[in-house]
Image (cartoon, helix red, strand yellow):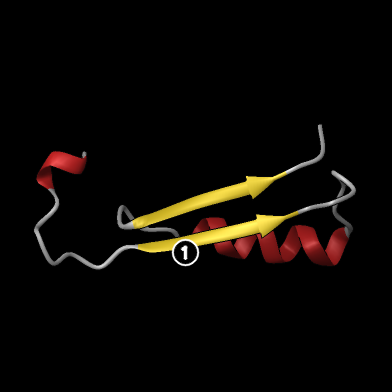
Amino acid sequence: SLSSQGLFSQKRIIEIIIPSGKINAEGGDSFYKILQNLTQNDLLVVHLPQ
């Protein structure tokens, strides 16, 4: 939770933009690798079309 974070803790914001709303096999592999390496200090934001 945010309340347990230290004042100087390191945070990463990972932003992925998928304009078409679809990813190919290579993109899927990359997305999977990102998910596997997320930590509690990471914030993943994925942008998709409406």
| Of the pair 15 and 40, the residue shown nearer to us | 15
Question: Residue drawn at (72%, 56%), measured in percent from left and top?
Answer: 17
Question: Residue drawn at (31%, 57%), measured in percent from left and top?
Answer: 41
Question: Residue drawn at (54%, 55%), measured in percent from left and top?
Answer: 35
- Total numbered labels: 1
Q: Quadrant of the C terminus?
A: top right
Secondary structure at badge 1 equals loop
Horizontal placement of 7 versus 22: left or right?
A: left
Badge 1: residue crowd in 10 Å (few <14, some 14–19, many ≥20): few
> Where is 8 relative to 42, above or below?
below
| Of the pair 1 and 24, the residue shown nearer to us | 1
Direction top: furthest residue: 50
Amino acid, disc 1: Asn
Q: Position of residue 21 (x, y in %)?
A: 85, 44
> Where is 48 relative to 8, above or below?
above
Question: Residue drawn at (20%, 42%), measured in percent from left and top?
Answer: 2
Q: Quadrant of the N terminus?
A: top left
Q: Position of residue 38 (x, y in %)?
A: 44, 58
Q: Position of residue 18 (x, y in %)?
A: 79, 53
Residue assigned mark 1: 37
Q: Position of residue 44 (x, y in %)?
A: 51, 51
